[in-house]
Amino acid sequence: LHQGAVYVFTRSGGTWSQKAKIVASDGQAGDGFGRAVAFDPADETIAGSTTHLLTGGLTRVHLFERSGPTWVQKATLTPPAPQANEQFGSTLALRSGRLVAGAPSRSIDGSAGRGAIVQFLRHETTGTWALDQVIIDPVGAAGDAFGTSVALHGEAMVVGARGVDQPGEANVGAVLVYWAGACNPNDAFGLLKFLPADVNQDSFVDCYDLALLLGHWGEVEPGDPLDLDGD
């Protein structure tokens, strides 16, 4: 019951056709597999996460690669020192052998709900996936929910943190940008923090704000509202 699945569709003209139904080989009742998905068409890799409704909120991410007409499970990933109800995998992004999974309710150094991104990398030779690092906002606070949303684009990783406060205003939210090779949380040069983050002004910091930012990557006209830091 509620084990979950991921469905793969392809489009021909204006018609979408189901090509595969993917389930976890070690799936259990209450997993809710498929609550979040990510797809890398270049590597033909799919990632899907679970909810684990019946096991204390401990979640996993399953990775599948296509082999001919079938999808083969290659890895099951968990965060280091898993925490109940940290929402690991509630957001996912996958690109060129790099998987990032949000855990927006994870406690960091005793700060509840500060949040984190857990990064996994695929070994170029063996094809195996392994934990690389846990990325946090180095000046984050309890309730920031860092990892609410995440996206990969070129050399950048963009992370939403919907609970970030500003003086006199609660839950304004923020968007943080990390550059590949500079994801060390102690390396401030690799991190830009933009406020406010509600780009489309719908009272939520979510994937739609990230989509707007990524869709306008590059030089813009002076005063463009998408240029959050005014550079």
Image: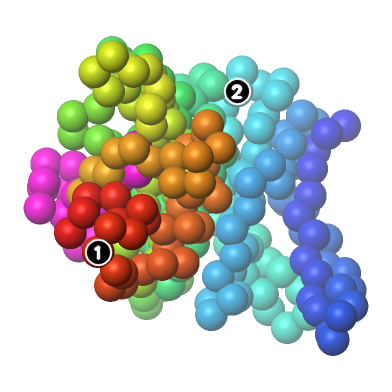
In the image shown, does 29 or 180 lie closer to the viewer? 180
Q: Amino acid at mark 1?
A: Pro
Q: Magenta segment range?
A: 174-191
Residue located farthest toward the front when viewing the structure as drawn: 223
- Identify the residue shown where x is 37% and y is 77%: 125
The quarter of the image holding the N terminus is top right
The quarter of the image holding the C terminus is bottom left
> Pointer 2: what residue?
57
Q: Position of residue 57 (x, y in %)?
A: 60, 23
- Identify the residue shown where x is 63% and y is 53%: 37
Q: Which numbered disc, 2 or 1, marks the residue that appears first in the sequence?
A: 2
* Residue 72 shown in magenta: no
Q: Mark 2 or mark 1: which is in front?
A: 1
Residue 222 marker? 1
Q: Position of residue 24 (x, y in %)?
A: 72, 50
- Identify the residue shown where x is 43% and y is 31%: 162
- Identify the residue shown where x is 38% and y is 41%: 197
Q: Secondary structure at mark 2?
A: loop
Q: Amino acid at mark 2?
A: Gly
In the image shown, does 113 or 3 lie closer to the viewer? 113
Indicate whether 16 appears above or below 5.
Answer: below
Q: Secondary structure at mark 1?
A: loop
How many C-alpha atoms fall within 10 Å of the one at disc 2: few (<14), some, or many (≥20)? some
In the image shown, does 118 or 16 lie closer to the viewer? 16
Marks 2 and 1, Cα distance to the nearest angstrom? 46 Å
Residue located farthest toward the bottom when viewing the structure as drawn: 13
Residue 168 image-quadrant placement: top left
Q: Position of residue 75 (x, y in %)?
A: 55, 56
Q: Position of residue 52 (x, y in %)?
A: 67, 29
Indicate whether 184 appears above or below 66.
Answer: above
Indicate whether 139 appears above or below 207.
Answer: above
